[in-house]
Image: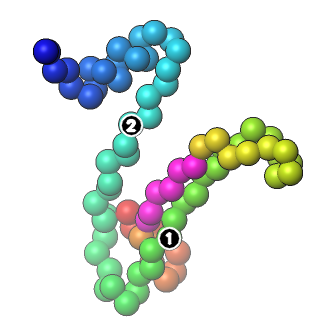
Amino acid sequence: MQHTSLEDQARTLEATGAYRVLRRIAPLLLETQAPRDQTRVGLFLDLETTGLDPACHEIIEFGMVPFVYTLDGRILG
């Protein structure tokens, strides 16, 4: 049995036109070091839904990306 890489498998699926494969975002290194007591961790949140009415629509995709920021609001990474 021949083994193919995950990236090759993703390309094969995408080539059919029936699939879209999402890839992991590589974490970014902090651009500026700051004292730990001067930083906080936040979370970007993205929801994709089938509509705006929570009574009859549903969440179909959920994404989160953590980030570090300083107390004065600068995003470090």
From the viewer's perspective, is residue 69 above or below residue 17?
below
Q: Position of residue 77 (x, y in %)?
A: 38, 63
Which residue sits at x=30%, y=21%?
A: 9
Q: Which residues are magenta?
A: 62-67
Quadrant housing the N terminus: top left
Toward the viewer: 11 or 66?
A: 11
Residue 64 among those drawn in magenta: yes
Residue 75 among those drawn in magenta: no
> Could you say which disc has been placed on residue 42 in the image?
1
Label 2 element class: loop
Which residue sits at x=60%, y=43%?
A: 61
Disc 2 target residue: 23
Q: Which mark is nearer the camera, 2 or 1?
A: 2
> Could you say which disc has been placed on residue 17 in the image?
none
Toward the viewer: 36 or 11?
A: 11
Which residue sits at x=33%, y=85%?
A: 36
Amino acid type shown at disc 1: Gly
